[in-house]
Structures are given as C-alpha cells and as structure tokens.
Image (cartoon, rainbow, N blue to C red):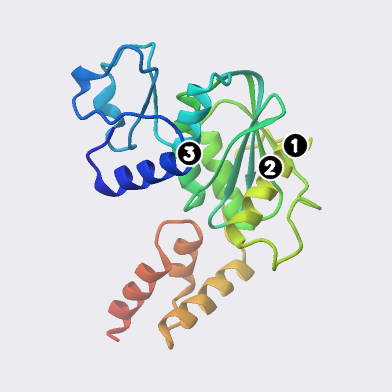
Amino acid sequence: MSREPRFYYRVIKELKERDVDFIVVDDIEKIPEDVSVILTSKKEENKLKKIKKDKKIVTNVEDAIRIANGFKSKFKELFIGIDPGLKPGIAFIGDGIVVRVARAYSPEEIKKEIESFLKNYKADKIVFKVGDGGGIYRDRILKTLQENFRHDIEIICERSTTPSISKEFNRATKDIIAAINIALKVGKIIKEKIEPMPNDGEIRKIQIRSREISGKITISRDLARKVALGELSIEEAIEMHKKRKNI
C-alpha cells in the first residue's frame, strides 16, 4: 500500500510479473485480518507503526514474497558482505542462503539498507564483511558501520571475488556478485577506529574527474578532499570553485 505513484506502479508491475497474489488497500483501518505482510514505501513506513505486531511491514518485493511464502526471518548467523566503492554492493546471507542483495548510492547509504533489512530479519550472530579494496570509499563504509552498529567487522581479501568477464556482467551486477563472495569468505576483525583520509592519488583522480565533467575546471585539492570524504558532490565542488574564482 502506498500513495506514491511511482512506487505503486513499479511494485504492482513486479508482483504481476512474478504471478504473486495481492490486494491493494488504501485505508490502514481496512487491512484484512488474514494479511500477514504489508508492502509499502520507505517514506510511508512510519505511518504504519500502529499496525498489529503480527503483521510484517516491508519496503521491497523480495522481502514481501519471502516472508509471505514462509521463509524464515531469524538466522543463527547473518553475514553482510559489502563490496566497497562509490556505489557499494551489499549481500545479506543468512545461514548460508542469499536472502537479499542491494546496491547503495553512496558509502553512507549502506546504513539505510542495513537498517531496513534488520527491521524484518534477526540473527543470533551478525558479522559485517567488507572487501579490502576501495580506498577512501572502504574507509567511509567502515566508519559508517562503526558509528551505527555494534557487530564485528571483518576485512576480507577481495582476490577472486569480482567477475572478470566484463561483457557478461554490468557494473552493478559485478558489485553484487563481489559482495556475495566477500560475505562467504573469512577475514580479520578490525578493532581500531577508522577515520577516512584520502591520499594524494585519490585527490588527483577527483580533480581529473572534475575537469572531465566541467570541460575546463580542475577543482582545488581542498574541494577534492571534501568530495572524497562525501561532504560535497563533485558537481557541488565545481560550482563552489566557480564562485571562488568568479568563473
């Protein structure tokens, strides 16, 4: 149920394609007693808090189908694999089964994806497994995990986790497959607090990227550093550089 047209039509289309039985309800007070799973948008999720506890509230089709079909939502072990990058791949593996995969829009966005998953799935033991590549993006992911969750975090060697056949997989699919492979490997638990700090090479790459995007502007090292840390988008940094230089 949702009053957001885009969400509504996308979900209805996907449910029909999967041949899943469903009903559409606009009034919270008129939800039938035999409905056990309510599929809604993330924006409207909070409006349904007064729903009885025996009804699961989810925000994606995968979880709705899984729960409705009686698949378990409690695991002994839950491994959350993350393939570091500007848009990290995420894989949730419960007791050896891939339960959900996702791709976040930024290193910090993984917080929302994980929190959304953990609202409907529980585990006796939860371990985050993060690939050792990704540089500054990896460190931003680690910082986000450390600041928002209280579970062990392992650093995983990424060797042989990413598909090498570029024509067979697009970037998003590669990231998700890598996240699954990362979740299945054993790594080393990190205990030290992570404070992201871009190196010279990462700053230069962002400066080069700013020139590619703008056609002529190479942003300052200070602005590039803020982009690397997620404090600014590269487009925002270019605009700030223009104002500083009166371009």
**Which mark sits nearer the N-terminus, 1 or 3?**
3
Q: Residue at x 25, y 43 (%)?
A: 4
Q: Position of residue 113 (x, y in %)?
A: 48, 39
Distance from the alpha carbon under mark 2 to that under mark 3: 15 Å
Q: In the picture shown, does residue 45 fall above or below 221? A: above
Task: Compare residues 129 and 28 and report the one nearer the observer.
Answer: 28
Q: Quadrant of the N terminus?
A: top left
Task: Compare residues 239 and 36 and report the one nearer the observer.
Answer: 36
Q: Residues within 10 Å of mark 1 (few under 14, many from 20)?
A: some
**Which mark sits nearer the N-terminus, 2 or 3?**
3
Distance from the alpha carbon under mark 1 to that under mark 2: 7 Å
Amino acid type shown at disc 3? Glu
Residue identified by numbered label 1:
184
Say what secondary structure mark 3 lies in. Answer: helix
Q: Residues within 10 Å of mark 3 (few under 14, many from 20)?
A: some
Say what secondary structure mark 2 lies in. Answer: helix
Residue identified by numbered label 2:
180
Residue 113: mark: 3
Q: Residue at x 47, y 53 (%)?
A: 105
For residue 18, side relative to residue 125 (left or right):
left
Amino acid type shown at disc 1? Leu
Distance from the alpha carbon under mark 1 to that under mark 3: 19 Å
Q: Residue at x 57, y 74 (%)?
A: 204
Q: Position of residue 173 (x, y in %)?
A: 62, 55
Q: Residues within 10 Å of mark 2 (few under 14, many from 20)?
A: many
